[in-house]
Amino acid sequence: TKDILGAYGYPETFIREVATLVKRSGRIRSELGDTGMRRMLLNVGPLFDDLLDLYQADCTSTKPGMQEAHQQRAVVFFRRAREVQERDRVASLRPPLDGKDIMRILGLSTGLELGRVTKSLRAHYLQKGPYSAAEAEL
């Protein structure tokens, strides 16, 4: 891939992107676990949508059932990737105050009350969106 595209004068960045897509397109599997899916997303990066387009277009079978199965695998893979991305995004959201901050501000010690306040703050943060530590203290 690199030699052929290089011979035609394509820019090096384009050649690297195409080589990545070609290399990764054969590794699309709907049964990838979360770790495998994260690895795929990390390896492909911003080329993920292009990878999916390539995979969908790369069905050489003339049998309608095979084409349909190939397209369905692409849909399942895409859905799984988005689910993993969304779970990871939500898990990475952290309120601006941690347990130690809450204990200091409210004069609490570790225990059920701290857990309730922390859970409530996280729910509020997820509902209202990002805000600063100063805003959280209010």
Image (cartoon, rainbow, N blue to C red):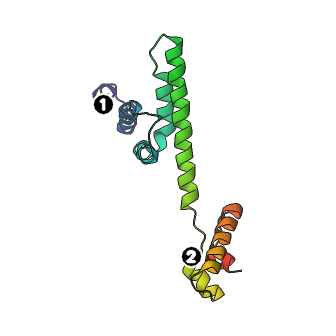
Who's the residue at 53% across and 54% down the image? 88
Quarter of the figure with the N terminus: top left
Disc 1 versus disc 2: distance between alpha carbons?
Answer: 49 Å
Q: Which residue is disc 2 drawn over?
A: 98
Q: Position of residue 99 (x, y in %)?
A: 57, 78
Q: Quadrant of residue 112?
A: bottom right
**Image spot of residue 119 (x, y percent):** 64, 70
Decide: is 52 above or below 113. Answer: above
Q: Residues within 10 Å of mark 1 (few under 14, many from 20)?
A: some
Q: Are marks 1 and 2 in contact (CB under 8 Å)?
A: no
Locate the C terminus and report the quarter of the image it occupies. Answer: bottom right
Q: Please determine whether, in this image, residue 73 is positioned above or below residue 112.
A: above
In the structure shown, which secondary structural element does the residue marked by tag 1 occupy? helix
Q: Foreground mark, 1 or 2?
A: 2
Residue drawn where x is 44% and y is 34% of the image:
29
**Whole-percent x and y of residue 81?**
52, 42
Residue kind at label 1, given as amino acid type? Lys
**Secondary structure at numbered mark 2:** loop
Front in this rendered view, residue 130 or 66: 66
Residue at mark 1: 2
Q: Kindly identify the amino acid type of the residue bearing the numbered disc 2.
A: Asp
Tell me what residue is drawn at x 46 percent, y 47 percent.
Answer: 34
- 61 on left or right of 105: left
Which comes before the other along the chain, label 1 or label 2? Answer: 1
Reply above or below: 3 against 38: above
Q: Residue furthest top?
A: 62
* Residue beneath the point at 42% across and 48% down: 35
Q: Is residue 108 left or right of residue 11?
A: right
